Image: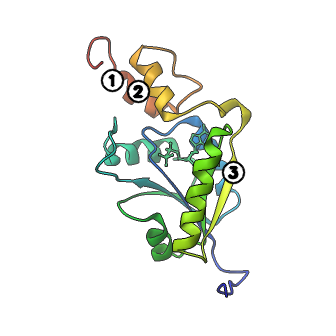
Amino acid sequence: MAKKVKATAARTAVYPGSFDPITLGHVDIIERVARTFDRVIVLIARSPDKQSLFTPEIRKTLIEKSLAHLDNVEVDIHEGLTTDYANRVGAMVLVRGLRAVVDFEYEVYMANMSAKLAPDIETLLVFARPAYYFLSSRSVKEVARHQGELSGLVPSPVQDALLKIFKKGKKK
Ligand code: ADP
């Protein structure tokens, strides 16, 4: 049987992901979730076998700068199972964003795995805003690599960081 939760208990949600880098699609999800929960932790997954552009520490700084206007949001880095982290901080909810239909299968798989590992923790799927439906960290890096316009895709601290890396001829 699921644990009884007091209606007054502070509600913490964890939003796990790679955030390499954070985009305006992520920011939109976080802003919306931050209105619903007392505390939101954006959790950067440290995965040694995944090629990333930014180190988890730089990703953390970029997220903190981009979310400075939200005072109930924190950023953390974690290596291992997200459900273990959620249990440790007393979070009852894992947030994931859902964009195009292609996200669906993966997100259902993740939600089922989390439910198996931690039956008390609920996965909350939040629909992306249509404007951000096709926005991904991967596409943003592609645009930056080819010196495309980044405004409207990522927060300004991320724009600056990408411009520094992909200054003409610096990195391919
Ligand atoms: P992961 O590698 O875990 O998929 P991402 O950083 O790519 O990490 O995404 C984290 C979460 O945010 C995922 O649930 C993903 O579907 C969601 N997400 C990614 N981009 C957007 C977007 N543009 N709008 C809404 N949700 C998004």
The amino acid at mark 3 is: Val
Tell which residue pokes out farthest to the top in this image: 168
- Image mark for residue 112: none
Residue at image location 52% in from the left, 16% down from the top: 149
**Residue 64: percent from left, percent from top:** 45, 48
Q: Earlier in the sequence, mark 2 or mark 3?
A: 3
The amino acid at mark 1 is: Lys
Q: Which quadrant would the C terminus be assigned to in this image? A: top left
Residue at image location 49% in from the left, 34% down from the top: 137
Where 110 sits versus 143, above or below? below
Asked whether 26 or 125 is in front, the reply is 125
Residue neighbourhood size for the residue with mark 3, other residues' Cα within 10 Å, grouped as few (<14), some (14–19), many (≥20): some
Q: As drawn, is 114 to the left or to the right of 58?
A: right
Q: Which residue is mark 1?
A: 164
Q: Regarding mark 1 in the picture, which secondary structure is present there?
A: helix
- Image mark for residue 126: 3
Q: Which residue is mark 2?
A: 160
Q: CA distance from mark 2 to mark 3?
A: 28 Å
Q: Which quadrant would the N terminus be assigned to in this image? A: bottom right
The answer to whether the residue labelled 1 contacts the one labelled 3, judged by CB atoms less than 8 Å apart, is no
**Residue 35: percent from left, percent from top:** 69, 56
Q: Regarding mark 2 in the picture, which secondary structure is present there?
A: helix
Q: Regarding mark 3 in the picture, which secondary structure is present there?
A: strand
Find out if the beta carbon at label 3 lies less than 8 Å from the nearest ligand 1 atom.
Answer: yes
**Residue 79: percent from left, percent from top:** 35, 60
Q: CA distance from mark 1 to mark 3?
A: 32 Å
Q: As drawn, is 154 to the left or to the right of 170?
A: right
Asked whether 30 or 92 is in front, the reply is 92
